[in-house]
Amino acid sequence: MSIWLSLCGAILFVAYVLGSLPTGYTVVKLLKGIDIREVGSGSTGATNVLRTLGKGPGAFVLLIDCLKGVLAIFLVYWLFNFAQTQNIIPSTINPEIWEAWMVTLAGFSVVLGHSKSIFLGFTGGKSVATSLGVLLAMNWQVALATAGVFAVVVAISRIVSLSSIAGAIAVSIFMTLLHQPLPYILFAVAAGLYVILRHRSNIERIIAGTEPKLGQKLQTETSEA
């Protein structure tokens, strides 16, 4: 059992470190020589990169941050496949139940790593793209439905933060409607609330009518991504 728990712990640690990889910070530093945390919203996420460097770099950061979430979950799938072939899963546990919980914990780890990066003094983005990657690996139907809500809201409002919040609310509904395992539903609820909490300054600006739309610059330093 101790070997098995060590492997599970190692996977969760790797997921956190993977999430911590500072994609946005690195891209802006290489292309413009500045610290993305000192411009715009101060976030390392794709939205701030988009506003700072344009569509290309913004899309690249979005893709990589999303892939970090996908890879974190696939590491769990690999672990269970490897463990079963090597017969190292303890007979006292149910692999199916454990896998669902491990997927959920790895999802939390990579999302936390993105927003609280160990490489950036525990700063980062708002974990929207990384959460989407986790959802894609968990259940692609839920991920696409959530992305659809994001797309519709952003097409109507032209406000990325509002669209992210809408997606964060919708994901729990889709997880429940598609009868996903309880750990996945709990991830959707907790991650959704976390994303909304990370957008609290955006919510204040939305209420005040000062939240910038796509193509507009953020006039004051806040936490965005």
Image (cartoon, rainbow, N blue to C red):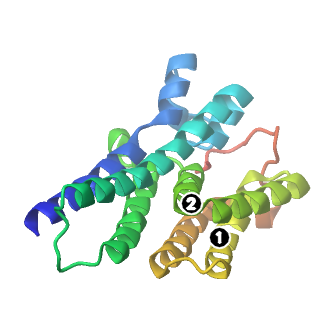
Secondary element type, mark 2: helix
Asked if residue 59 is positioned above or below residue 214 in the image, the reply reads above
Q: Is residue 185 left or right of residue 21?
A: right
Asked if residue 122 is positioned above or below residue 176 in the image, the reply reads above
How far apart, in angstroms, are the residues tagged by discs 2 and 1? 9 Å
Q: Position of residue 97 (x, y in %)?
A: 36, 77
Marker disc for residue 135:
2
Amino acid type indicated by mark 2: Leu
Give the residue displayed 80% in from the left and 53% down from the top: 159
Toward the viewer: 157 or 179? 179
Q: Is residue 18 left or right of residue 212?
A: left
Toward the viewer: 128 or 98? 98
Give the residue displayed 58% in from the left and 69% down from the top: 192
| Disc 2 + disc 1, Cβ < 8 Å | yes
Q: Position of residue 42 (x, y in %)?
A: 56, 42
**Which image quadrant: the N terminus?**
bottom left
Toward the viewer: 218 or 136? 136
Marker disc for residue 140:
none
Give the residue displayed 80% in from the left and 54% down from the top: 151
Q: Identify the mark nearer the N-term, 2 or 1.
A: 2
- Do we see residue 26 in this rendering? yes
- Do we see residue 204 in this rendering? no
The residue labelled by disc 1 is 171
Amino acid type indicated by mark 1: Val
